[in-house]
Amino acid sequence: MTTRIFVSRDAGAVAVGADEVARALTQAAAKKGASIEIVRTGSRGLYWLEPMVEVATSKGRVAFGPVTEADAVSVLDAMLADGSHALRLGVAEEIPWLKRQTRLTFARCGVVDPRSVEDYKAHGGYKGLARALTLGTAGILDDVTKSGLRGRGGAGFPTGIKWKTVADASADQKYVVCNADEGDSGTFADRMIMEGDPFVLIEGMTIAAICVGATRGYIYIRSEYPHAIEAMNAAIAAAKRAGYLGAKVAGSAHAFELEVRVGAGAYVCGEETAMLDSLEGKRGMVRAKPPLPALKGLFGKPSVVNNVLSFSAVPFILDRGGQAYADFGMGRSRGTMPIQLAGNIKHAGLFEVAFGVTLGELVDDIGGGTRSGRPVRAVQVGGPLGAYFPRALFDTPFDYEAFAAKDGLIGHGGIVVFDDTVDMAKQARFAMEFCAIESCGKCTPCRVGSTRGVEVIDRIIANTNRAANTTLLQDLCNTMKFGSLCALGGFTPYPVMSALTHFPEDFGAPPRLQAAE
């Protein structure tokens, strides 16, 4: 009898030794004369337990972690005997951190073989596409609109409206473009899904193409993601061999070709119009809007441009219906959000949950507080352009409108935690410096404002005419926020002003009294 053992091939797991663990398990089995099969999956997202290794048993998949190369022999013994071990975590699905999640988008990540179409289908894959082919454009749009799905890349724009605009546009060629240029600090959900369940992204993009009448699609992936690039290319080839891409998608009259394009690492190419310029072979520069990409996008043609997580949510919606997705969440934020916990946090990883969970629950309860054991002082939500929230705002529910009301952003769902040793003036300076380095240079508020911002913050830190320079910094942030062409310059004021507002003592001013503390 062959024992099936599952080891992640996710870049995060590989970085801490997953390849070495897989090799050591194979060697240990050979010495024992044991018959094993190593299946390289994605990650389930419990990064503090990686490499997490699982074995198929009659009770389900039993997990062990974090496993090192030196643990391979003893762990294999425990697996073969179904015995106890210090690293045994129990049945994976019963691990409390996993059990309390609502995994709709990431249901298969860490479970399936990301190179196998058959495994994907065995776990419910391509059911959404099958139903989409029976519904047609109007039916697909109805489901996506009813679901309340909004862009998961940060802007939160209603997906149904975007798709309808492209579907209604008249053109000889339309495109579907996936923005996988995941560059925000503390975010890794796009990479995880591409490496662990790439067919869900392919299926979502294929459904979008059928809906709007597109025949070509592109996935724009940053060059820093070689594992994701390899995984997506392998999955696209497999999907084409299985008849799910090409001239007759799943035997239908619809044609859809898909390919990966690799970016060169410019942060600004995460902005959709700069990404489109890069896809066209130009330098990534932000375009003025209107015209919108939905009407004049890639090569001047109507284009659906969505994030990885947006497309990956679509197969569930088409399989179960729009209302099933809308039943989760709060207010105008429907469905689930794959939240990424990073920074100085005990339980770092991906936690998919319905909108409405509070920031405090995510950091203190789910994340377990700081890894250092020191008090949490600030969290940044939404990447390097997100606001810094103090503990006084930890009652804020994870919801687009709730965060906007507190001058914050959900962005791509990344949360970076800092303990009480952080210097918030330096963090504010970093935001301006980051913007100056990554600016495409097209608009003055972003190009010049960020450089002047670094200089002004340096003067404040040096206690040079602090009051006047603080006022100047506030005016500069206001100019950048409302005068920049895109979100890079427009959102840089969020971390700067939140640091200045909530942590004035780090800028040499008297501490701000926090009512909730």
Image (spheres, rainbow, N blue to C red):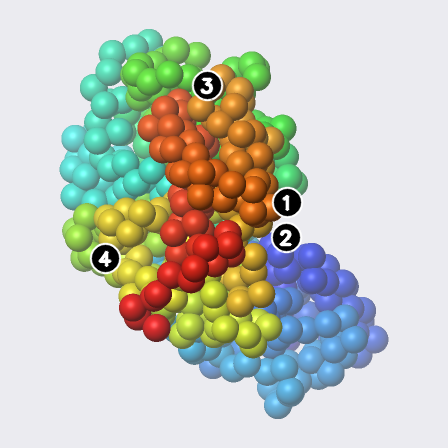
Which tag, 1 or 2, sits closer to the chain's start? 2
Contact? badges 3 and 1 (CB < 8 Å): no
Tell me the quarter of the picture where residue 253 sits. top left
Mark 2 crowdedness (10 Å alpha carbons): few <14, some 14-19, many ≥20 = many
Contact? badges 4 and 1 (CB < 8 Å): no
Does 51 appear above or below 398? below
Spatial CA distance of label 2 from label 3 is 36 Å
Please tell me whether mark 2 or mark 3 is closer to you in this view: 3
Q: Is residue 186 left or right of residue 291?
A: right
Mark 3 crowdedness (10 Å alpha carbons): few <14, some 14-19, many ≥20 = some
Q: Secondary structure at mark 1?
A: helix
Where residue 352 sits: x, y (%)?
Answer: 38, 60
Q: Name the residue carrying label 2.
A: 11
Spatial CA distance of label 2 from label 4 is 30 Å
Contact? badges 1 and 2 (CB < 8 Å): yes
State the residue in front, 292 or 371: 371
Q: Name the residue carrying label 4.
A: 329
Q: Amino acid at mark 3?
A: Cys
Please tell me whether mark 4 or mark 1 is closer to you in this view: 4
Spatial CA distance of label 3 from label 1 is 34 Å
Q: Name the residue carrying label 3.
A: 443
Which tag, 2 or 3, sits closer to the chain's start? 2
Tell me the quarter of the picture where residue 273 sits. top left
Q: Amino acid at mark 2?
A: Ala
Q: Residue at x 42, y 72 (%)?
A: 364
Does 447 appear above or below 299? below
Please tell me the numbered disc located at residue 227: 1
Please tell me whether mark 2 or mark 4 is closer to you in this view: 4
Q: Secondary structure at mark 4?
A: strand
State the residue in front, 163 or 5: 163
Q: Secondary structure at mark 2?
A: helix
Spatial CA distance of label 1 from label 2 is 6 Å
